[in-house]
Amino acid sequence: MNRLLLLRLAIWVLPAASLYALLLTRKRSRPLFAAVVLGLLWNAAALLAINVIALRLEWWSFHQAVPAFMEVAIEPWVGWTILWTAVSLLAEERLVAPMLLAVGWLDLLAMPLLQPLVVLDDSWLVGEMLSLVCVFVPGLLLVRWTLHRTHLKARLSLQIICASLLLLWIVPSVALGQTSAWDSVFQLPTWRFGIILQLVLIPAILGVRAAIEFAEKGQGTPLPYDPPSRVVTSGPYSYVRNPMQLSMVLIFLVGGIVLWNGWLLAAAFVAFVYGAGLAEWHEDVQLFERFNDVWTSYRASVRAWVPRWRPAVSEPSTLLVAYSCGTCSSIGRWFLTRDPVGLEIAAAEDSNDPELRRVTYVPADGPSQRGVIAIARALEHIHLGWAIVGWVLATPVVSHFAQLVVDVFGPTPHAVAGLPYDTAACSIQPEHTRTIASAKAH
Protein backbone atom coordinates (compact mmCIF):
# COMPACT_ATOMS: atom_id res chain seq x y z
CA MET A 1 0.00 0.00 0.00
CA ASN A 2 1.54 3.32 -1.06
CA ARG A 3 1.80 6.32 1.26
CA LEU A 4 -0.94 8.35 -0.45
CA LEU A 5 -3.53 5.58 -0.15
CA LEU A 6 -2.56 4.93 3.47
CA LEU A 7 -2.98 8.61 4.33
CA ARG A 8 -6.34 8.76 2.57
CA LEU A 9 -7.63 5.87 4.68
CA ALA A 10 -6.07 6.85 7.99
CA ILE A 11 -7.14 10.49 7.88
CA TRP A 12 -10.83 9.65 8.20
CA VAL A 13 -10.92 6.08 9.56
CA LEU A 14 -8.97 6.91 12.73
CA PRO A 15 -11.12 9.97 13.65
CA ALA A 16 -14.31 8.03 12.87
CA ALA A 17 -13.20 5.14 15.09
CA SER A 18 -12.28 7.60 17.85
CA LEU A 19 -15.67 9.31 17.72
CA TYR A 20 -17.48 5.96 17.71
CA ALA A 21 -15.46 4.72 20.70
CA LEU A 22 -16.14 7.96 22.54
CA LEU A 23 -19.89 7.68 21.94
CA LEU A 24 -19.88 4.12 23.28
CA THR A 25 -18.75 5.48 26.64
CA ARG A 26 -21.59 8.03 26.81
CA LYS A 27 -25.16 7.52 27.90
CA ARG A 28 -27.53 8.09 25.01
CA SER A 29 -29.56 11.27 25.31
CA ARG A 30 -31.21 13.95 23.19
CA PRO A 31 -28.61 16.62 24.10
CA LEU A 32 -25.77 14.24 23.17
CA PHE A 33 -27.31 13.45 19.78
CA ALA A 34 -27.99 17.14 19.14
CA ALA A 35 -24.42 18.06 20.11
CA VAL A 36 -22.90 15.46 17.77
CA VAL A 37 -25.12 16.47 14.83
CA LEU A 38 -24.46 20.18 15.32
CA GLY A 39 -20.74 19.60 15.83
CA LEU A 40 -20.46 17.63 12.60
CA LEU A 41 -22.54 20.12 10.61
CA TRP A 42 -20.67 23.15 11.97
CA ASN A 43 -17.21 21.69 11.38
CA ALA A 44 -18.14 20.40 7.92
CA ALA A 45 -19.53 23.73 6.71
CA ALA A 46 -16.95 25.98 8.36
CA LEU A 47 -13.94 23.81 7.45
CA LEU A 48 -15.09 23.72 3.84
CA ALA A 49 -15.24 27.52 3.80
CA ILE A 50 -11.76 27.81 5.35
CA ASN A 51 -10.31 25.32 2.86
CA VAL A 52 -11.81 27.16 -0.11
CA ILE A 53 -10.23 30.38 1.19
CA ALA A 54 -6.92 28.56 1.77
CA LEU A 55 -6.86 27.29 -1.81
CA ARG A 56 -7.55 30.76 -3.18
CA LEU A 57 -4.81 32.31 -1.03
CA GLU A 58 -2.47 29.36 -1.62
CA TRP A 59 -1.96 28.49 2.05
CA TRP A 60 -2.08 24.81 1.11
CA SER A 61 -3.25 22.54 -1.70
CA PHE A 62 -4.35 18.93 -2.18
CA HIS A 63 -3.11 16.05 -4.31
CA GLN A 64 -4.74 16.19 -7.73
CA ALA A 65 -5.55 12.46 -7.84
CA VAL A 66 -7.88 12.38 -4.79
CA PRO A 67 -11.67 12.92 -4.88
CA ALA A 68 -12.59 16.54 -4.20
CA PHE A 69 -15.61 18.74 -3.61
CA MET A 70 -15.24 22.40 -4.56
CA GLU A 71 -11.54 21.56 -5.12
CA VAL A 72 -11.21 20.49 -1.45
CA ALA A 73 -10.03 16.90 -0.93
CA ILE A 74 -12.91 14.98 0.62
CA GLU A 75 -10.97 12.62 2.93
CA PRO A 76 -9.03 15.34 4.83
CA TRP A 77 -12.16 17.49 5.04
CA VAL A 78 -14.27 14.64 6.45
CA GLY A 79 -11.47 13.46 8.73
CA TRP A 80 -10.89 16.86 10.31
CA THR A 81 -14.65 17.37 10.66
CA ILE A 82 -15.00 14.14 12.65
CA LEU A 83 -11.78 14.69 14.63
CA TRP A 84 -12.70 18.18 15.83
CA THR A 85 -16.21 17.02 16.74
CA ALA A 86 -14.74 14.17 18.80
CA VAL A 87 -12.28 16.52 20.52
CA SER A 88 -15.14 18.92 21.30
CA LEU A 89 -17.08 16.11 22.98
CA LEU A 90 -14.02 15.00 24.89
CA ALA A 91 -13.32 18.54 26.08
CA GLU A 92 -16.83 19.47 27.19
CA GLU A 93 -15.77 20.26 30.77
CA ARG A 94 -12.28 21.61 30.08
CA LEU A 95 -11.13 25.20 29.59
CA VAL A 96 -11.15 26.47 26.02
CA ALA A 97 -7.61 27.94 26.01
CA PRO A 98 -5.77 24.71 26.96
CA MET A 99 -7.81 22.73 24.42
CA LEU A 100 -7.03 25.32 21.74
CA LEU A 101 -3.32 25.00 22.49
CA ALA A 102 -3.51 21.20 22.50
CA VAL A 103 -5.30 21.01 19.16
CA GLY A 104 -2.98 23.65 17.73
CA TRP A 105 0.09 21.59 18.68
CA LEU A 106 -1.54 18.44 17.29
CA ASP A 107 -2.12 20.18 13.96
CA LEU A 108 1.42 21.58 13.92
CA LEU A 109 2.76 18.04 14.24
CA ALA A 110 0.23 16.29 11.98
CA MET A 111 -0.14 18.67 9.03
CA PRO A 112 3.45 18.34 7.72
CA LEU A 113 3.12 14.54 7.91
CA LEU A 114 0.17 14.55 5.49
CA GLN A 115 2.23 15.21 2.39
CA PRO A 116 1.66 14.38 -0.46
CA LEU A 117 -2.07 14.33 0.37
CA VAL A 118 -1.88 17.89 1.71
CA VAL A 119 0.86 20.17 0.34
CA LEU A 120 1.66 23.08 2.66
CA ASP A 121 2.81 26.52 1.59
CA ASP A 122 5.14 28.67 3.69
CA SER A 123 2.13 30.71 4.90
CA TRP A 124 0.03 27.72 5.98
CA LEU A 125 0.17 28.73 9.65
CA VAL A 126 -2.05 31.72 8.85
CA GLY A 127 -4.76 29.35 7.63
CA GLU A 128 -4.18 27.08 10.61
CA MET A 129 -4.69 29.94 13.08
CA LEU A 130 -7.80 31.07 11.22
CA SER A 131 -9.18 27.52 11.32
CA LEU A 132 -8.61 27.17 15.05
CA VAL A 133 -10.14 30.54 15.95
CA CYS A 134 -13.04 30.60 13.47
CA VAL A 135 -13.93 26.90 13.28
CA PHE A 136 -12.61 24.84 16.20
CA VAL A 137 -13.37 27.24 19.06
CA PRO A 138 -16.96 28.05 17.95
CA GLY A 139 -17.56 24.35 17.28
CA LEU A 140 -16.25 23.40 20.72
CA LEU A 141 -18.51 25.96 22.38
CA LEU A 142 -21.52 24.91 20.29
CA VAL A 143 -21.08 21.26 21.32
CA ARG A 144 -20.57 22.20 24.98
CA TRP A 145 -23.53 24.59 25.13
CA THR A 146 -25.80 22.09 23.37
CA LEU A 147 -24.85 19.30 25.78
CA HIS A 148 -25.63 21.47 28.79
CA ARG A 149 -28.48 23.46 27.13
CA THR A 150 -26.91 26.81 28.05
CA HIS A 151 -26.11 30.06 26.18
CA LEU A 152 -29.25 29.75 24.05
CA LYS A 153 -28.75 32.95 22.02
CA ALA A 154 -25.11 32.18 21.28
CA ARG A 155 -25.72 28.63 20.13
CA LEU A 156 -28.70 29.75 18.05
CA SER A 157 -26.46 32.33 16.35
CA LEU A 158 -23.97 29.60 15.46
CA GLN A 159 -26.80 27.40 14.16
CA ILE A 160 -28.01 30.25 11.94
CA ILE A 161 -24.50 30.77 10.55
CA CYS A 162 -24.19 27.03 9.90
CA ALA A 163 -27.61 26.84 8.21
CA SER A 164 -26.74 29.87 6.06
CA LEU A 165 -23.54 28.20 4.86
CA LEU A 166 -25.43 25.01 4.05
CA LEU A 167 -28.53 26.50 2.40
CA LEU A 168 -27.10 29.60 0.73
CA TRP A 169 -23.69 28.31 -0.32
CA ILE A 170 -23.03 24.55 -0.16
CA VAL A 171 -26.33 23.23 -1.57
CA PRO A 172 -26.43 25.86 -4.37
CA SER A 173 -22.77 25.06 -5.13
CA VAL A 174 -23.70 21.41 -5.64
CA ALA A 175 -26.60 22.43 -7.87
CA LEU A 176 -24.56 24.95 -9.85
CA GLY A 177 -21.65 22.60 -10.42
CA GLN A 178 -19.39 23.58 -7.52
CA THR A 179 -17.36 26.79 -7.33
CA SER A 180 -16.87 27.78 -10.96
CA ALA A 181 -20.60 28.18 -11.63
CA TRP A 182 -20.81 31.03 -9.10
CA ASP A 183 -18.84 33.13 -11.59
CA SER A 184 -21.85 33.13 -13.93
CA VAL A 185 -24.07 34.33 -11.06
CA PHE A 186 -21.78 37.22 -10.14
CA GLN A 187 -21.48 38.20 -13.81
CA LEU A 188 -25.21 38.85 -14.10
CA PRO A 189 -26.31 42.46 -14.71
CA THR A 190 -26.39 44.44 -11.47
CA TRP A 191 -30.15 45.00 -11.60
CA ARG A 192 -30.86 41.31 -12.12
CA PHE A 193 -28.42 40.23 -9.43
CA GLY A 194 -30.02 42.72 -7.01
CA ILE A 195 -33.52 41.37 -7.69
CA ILE A 196 -32.36 37.77 -7.21
CA LEU A 197 -30.63 38.71 -3.96
CA GLN A 198 -33.77 40.37 -2.59
CA LEU A 199 -35.99 37.47 -3.63
CA VAL A 200 -33.72 35.04 -1.78
CA LEU A 201 -33.22 37.26 1.28
CA ILE A 202 -36.95 37.55 2.04
CA PRO A 203 -37.48 33.81 2.70
CA ALA A 204 -34.06 33.67 4.39
CA ILE A 205 -35.13 36.43 6.80
CA LEU A 206 -38.36 34.52 7.45
CA GLY A 207 -36.28 31.54 8.55
CA VAL A 208 -33.97 33.63 10.73
CA ARG A 209 -36.87 35.43 12.41
CA ALA A 210 -38.65 32.12 13.05
CA ALA A 211 -35.51 30.63 14.61
CA ILE A 212 -35.10 33.68 16.87
CA GLU A 213 -38.76 33.45 17.90
CA PHE A 214 -38.24 29.77 18.65
CA ALA A 215 -35.45 30.64 21.06
CA GLU A 216 -37.02 33.74 22.64
CA LYS A 217 -40.46 32.28 23.27
CA GLY A 218 -39.86 28.52 23.32
CA GLN A 219 -36.38 28.41 24.87
CA GLY A 220 -35.29 25.90 22.24
CA THR A 221 -33.63 25.73 18.82
CA PRO A 222 -34.79 24.46 15.40
CA LEU A 223 -32.98 21.13 15.85
CA PRO A 224 -35.60 18.44 16.68
CA TYR A 225 -33.38 17.05 19.46
CA ASP A 226 -33.11 20.47 21.12
CA PRO A 227 -36.84 21.30 21.23
CA PRO A 228 -38.69 24.24 22.81
CA SER A 229 -40.39 23.95 26.17
CA ARG A 230 -43.71 25.33 24.89
CA VAL A 231 -45.70 25.81 21.69
CA VAL A 232 -44.51 28.94 19.89
CA THR A 233 -47.47 30.74 18.30
CA SER A 234 -46.19 34.31 17.87
CA GLY A 235 -44.15 36.07 15.19
CA PRO A 236 -43.96 34.07 11.94
CA TYR A 237 -45.72 31.19 13.71
CA SER A 238 -48.89 33.27 13.94
CA TYR A 239 -49.05 33.13 10.12
CA VAL A 240 -47.74 29.65 9.25
CA ARG A 241 -46.86 26.54 11.28
CA ASN A 242 -43.65 25.64 9.45
CA PRO A 243 -41.90 28.96 8.73
CA MET A 244 -38.36 27.53 8.80
CA GLN A 245 -39.22 24.64 6.47
CA LEU A 246 -41.13 27.06 4.21
CA SER A 247 -38.09 29.35 4.21
CA MET A 248 -35.82 26.53 3.02
CA VAL A 249 -38.22 25.45 0.27
CA LEU A 250 -38.66 29.04 -0.96
CA ILE A 251 -34.90 29.69 -1.03
CA PHE A 252 -34.34 26.67 -3.29
CA LEU A 253 -37.48 27.37 -5.33
CA VAL A 254 -36.66 31.03 -5.97
CA GLY A 255 -33.04 30.18 -6.76
CA GLY A 256 -34.11 27.40 -9.11
CA ILE A 257 -36.58 29.61 -10.99
CA VAL A 258 -34.47 32.75 -11.38
CA LEU A 259 -31.34 30.75 -12.32
CA TRP A 260 -33.41 28.12 -14.15
CA ASN A 261 -31.55 25.31 -12.40
CA GLY A 262 -33.17 21.90 -12.23
CA TRP A 263 -31.10 20.73 -9.26
CA LEU A 264 -32.28 23.62 -7.08
CA LEU A 265 -35.88 22.94 -8.10
CA ALA A 266 -35.35 19.28 -7.20
CA ALA A 267 -33.91 20.34 -3.83
CA ALA A 268 -37.03 22.45 -3.20
CA PHE A 269 -39.26 19.48 -4.06
CA VAL A 270 -37.33 17.08 -1.81
CA ALA A 271 -37.35 19.59 1.07
CA PHE A 272 -41.11 20.06 0.70
CA VAL A 273 -41.87 16.33 0.48
CA TYR A 274 -39.74 15.59 3.53
CA GLY A 275 -41.16 18.52 5.52
CA ALA A 276 -44.78 17.84 4.56
CA GLY A 277 -44.45 14.09 4.98
CA LEU A 278 -42.20 12.35 7.45
CA ALA A 279 -41.02 15.41 9.42
CA GLU A 280 -44.50 16.91 9.85
CA TRP A 281 -46.04 13.57 10.85
CA HIS A 282 -43.25 12.90 13.37
CA GLU A 283 -43.40 16.42 14.86
CA ASP A 284 -47.20 16.38 14.90
CA VAL A 285 -47.25 13.24 17.05
CA GLN A 286 -44.57 14.55 19.40
CA LEU A 287 -46.17 17.97 19.82
CA PHE A 288 -49.60 16.47 20.50
CA GLU A 289 -48.12 14.18 23.15
CA ARG A 290 -46.30 17.07 24.83
CA PHE A 291 -48.83 19.91 24.55
CA ASN A 292 -52.18 18.22 23.77
CA ASP A 293 -55.02 20.80 23.56
CA VAL A 294 -52.69 23.79 23.11
CA TRP A 295 -51.17 22.20 20.02
CA THR A 296 -54.54 21.02 18.71
CA SER A 297 -56.00 24.53 18.97
CA TYR A 298 -53.00 26.12 17.30
CA ARG A 299 -52.96 23.50 14.55
CA ALA A 300 -56.62 24.21 13.77
CA SER A 301 -55.96 27.96 13.45
CA VAL A 302 -52.76 28.09 11.39
CA ARG A 303 -51.96 26.20 8.18
CA ALA A 304 -48.72 24.26 7.79
CA TRP A 305 -47.45 25.69 4.49
CA VAL A 306 -49.79 28.43 3.23
CA PRO A 307 -49.48 31.60 5.35
CA ARG A 308 -52.55 33.38 6.66
CA TRP A 309 -53.10 36.98 5.54
CA ARG A 310 -53.99 38.08 9.07
CA PRO A 311 -52.27 36.58 12.13
CA ALA A 312 -53.85 34.14 14.55
CA VAL A 313 -53.31 35.70 17.98
CA SER A 314 -54.46 33.84 21.08
CA GLU A 315 -53.43 36.42 23.70
CA PRO A 316 -53.27 40.19 23.10
CA SER A 317 -50.06 42.19 23.35
CA THR A 318 -49.67 45.89 24.16
CA LEU A 319 -47.80 48.71 22.45
CA LEU A 320 -46.92 51.46 24.93
CA VAL A 321 -46.59 54.87 23.28
CA ALA A 322 -46.18 58.28 24.89
CA TYR A 323 -49.46 60.14 24.48
CA SER A 324 -47.66 63.31 25.57
CA CYS A 325 -45.27 63.05 22.58
CA GLY A 326 -46.64 64.13 19.21
CA THR A 327 -44.47 61.76 17.18
CA CYS A 328 -45.14 58.79 19.47
CA SER A 329 -48.88 59.36 19.63
CA SER A 330 -48.99 59.54 15.83
CA ILE A 331 -47.42 56.06 15.78
CA GLY A 332 -50.23 54.83 18.03
CA ARG A 333 -52.85 56.36 15.73
CA TRP A 334 -51.15 54.81 12.69
CA PHE A 335 -51.49 51.34 14.17
CA LEU A 336 -55.08 51.87 15.30
CA THR A 337 -56.19 52.91 11.81
CA ARG A 338 -54.89 49.58 10.48
CA ASP A 339 -57.00 47.52 12.88
CA PRO A 340 -54.23 45.28 14.28
CA VAL A 341 -55.13 41.80 15.51
CA GLY A 342 -54.50 41.24 19.20
CA LEU A 343 -52.64 44.53 19.75
CA GLU A 344 -53.72 47.14 22.27
CA ILE A 345 -52.37 50.70 22.24
CA ALA A 346 -51.81 52.09 25.74
CA ALA A 347 -50.31 55.22 27.26
CA ALA A 348 -46.69 54.81 28.34
CA GLU A 349 -47.34 57.48 30.95
CA ASP A 350 -49.41 54.97 32.93
CA SER A 351 -46.48 52.57 33.19
CA ASN A 352 -44.66 52.04 36.49
CA ASP A 353 -41.38 51.37 34.68
CA PRO A 354 -39.00 54.32 35.29
CA GLU A 355 -36.69 53.02 32.53
CA LEU A 356 -39.36 53.27 29.85
CA ARG A 357 -37.91 55.83 27.42
CA ARG A 358 -38.94 54.47 24.02
CA VAL A 359 -41.98 52.93 22.37
CA THR A 360 -42.34 49.55 24.07
CA TYR A 361 -43.93 46.30 22.92
CA VAL A 362 -45.24 44.15 25.78
CA PRO A 363 -46.10 40.62 24.59
CA ALA A 364 -48.39 38.30 26.49
CA ASP A 365 -45.71 35.62 26.77
CA GLY A 366 -42.24 37.10 26.96
CA PRO A 367 -39.95 40.03 27.76
CA SER A 368 -40.75 43.56 26.61
CA GLN A 369 -38.95 45.04 23.60
CA ARG A 370 -38.24 48.71 22.97
CA GLY A 371 -37.60 51.12 20.14
CA VAL A 372 -37.38 49.93 16.55
CA ILE A 373 -37.79 46.29 17.61
CA ALA A 374 -41.06 47.22 19.34
CA ILE A 375 -42.39 48.77 16.13
CA ALA A 376 -41.25 45.72 14.15
CA ARG A 377 -43.07 43.38 16.54
CA ALA A 378 -46.22 45.48 16.42
CA LEU A 379 -46.22 45.33 12.60
CA GLU A 380 -46.73 41.56 12.88
CA HIS A 381 -50.25 42.23 14.17
CA ILE A 382 -51.51 43.97 11.00
CA HIS A 383 -51.17 41.57 8.07
CA LEU A 384 -48.58 39.46 6.24
CA GLY A 385 -47.26 42.33 4.14
CA TRP A 386 -46.47 44.54 7.13
CA ALA A 387 -45.24 41.48 9.06
CA ILE A 388 -42.56 40.88 6.42
CA VAL A 389 -41.48 44.52 6.77
CA GLY A 390 -41.31 43.96 10.52
CA TRP A 391 -39.21 40.80 10.17
CA VAL A 392 -36.73 42.61 7.94
CA LEU A 393 -36.62 45.53 10.38
CA ALA A 394 -36.08 43.17 13.34
CA THR A 395 -33.17 41.37 11.71
CA PRO A 396 -29.93 41.73 13.69
CA VAL A 397 -27.69 44.51 12.31
CA VAL A 398 -30.66 46.02 10.42
CA SER A 399 -32.47 46.74 13.69
CA HIS A 400 -29.33 48.17 15.30
CA PHE A 401 -28.70 50.49 12.35
CA ALA A 402 -32.35 51.57 12.23
CA GLN A 403 -32.32 52.31 15.96
CA LEU A 404 -29.17 54.42 15.53
CA VAL A 405 -30.84 56.44 12.77
CA VAL A 406 -33.98 56.97 14.86
CA ASP A 407 -31.94 58.05 17.89
CA VAL A 408 -30.00 60.57 15.78
CA PHE A 409 -32.86 62.07 13.77
CA GLY A 410 -35.92 61.26 15.89
CA PRO A 411 -37.19 62.47 19.26
CA THR A 412 -34.76 62.17 22.15
CA PRO A 413 -35.58 59.16 24.38
CA HIS A 414 -36.86 60.34 27.74
CA ALA A 415 -38.73 58.97 30.75
CA VAL A 416 -42.50 59.50 30.52
CA ALA A 417 -43.89 57.44 33.42
CA GLY A 418 -46.24 59.58 35.50
CA LEU A 419 -46.35 62.55 33.10
CA PRO A 420 -49.73 64.16 32.32
CA TYR A 421 -51.18 63.45 28.88
CA ASP A 422 -54.22 63.96 26.70
CA THR A 423 -56.31 60.78 26.78
CA ALA A 424 -57.55 61.52 23.24
CA ALA A 425 -54.03 61.79 21.81
CA CYS A 426 -54.25 58.39 20.08
CA SER A 427 -57.95 58.41 19.27
CA ILE A 428 -58.97 57.57 15.73
CA GLN A 429 -60.82 60.20 13.74
CA PRO A 430 -64.46 59.31 12.99
CA GLU A 431 -63.81 59.02 9.26
CA HIS A 432 -61.11 56.47 9.95
CA THR A 433 -63.46 54.52 12.18
CA ARG A 434 -66.08 54.45 9.42
CA THR A 435 -63.47 53.32 6.91
CA ILE A 436 -62.46 50.40 9.12
CA ALA A 437 -66.07 49.43 9.78
CA SER A 438 -66.82 49.57 6.06
CA ALA A 439 -63.80 47.40 5.29
CA LYS A 440 -64.92 44.83 7.87
CA ALA A 441 -68.42 44.77 6.39
CA HIS A 442 -67.03 43.91 2.98
Image (tube, grey):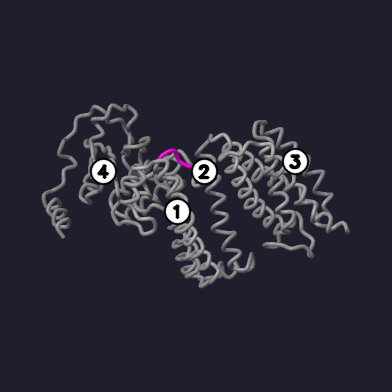
Amino acid bearing label 4 = Leu
Q: Nearer the viewer, mark 3 or mark 2?
A: 2
- Residue linked to disc 1: 281
Task: Specify few, some or many for label 2: CA neighbours under 10 Å numbering under 14, 14-19, or 20 or more.
Answer: many
The answer to whether residue 118 shows anywhere in this view is: no
Q: Which residues are magenta?
A: 225-230
Which quarter of the figure has residue 328? top left
**Which badge, 3 or 4, comes first in the chain's sequence?**
3
Q: Position of residue 29 (x, y in %)?
A: 58, 39
Q: Amino acid at mark 3?
A: Gly
In the rendered structure, find residue 104 and report the number of the disc placed on it. 3
Marks 1 and 2, the one that precedes in the sequence: 2
Say which quarter of the image contains residue 234: top left
Residue designated by label 2: 156
Q: Main secondary structure of the magenta part?
A: loop
Left or right relative to 113: residue 71: left
The residue type indicated by label 1 comes to Trp
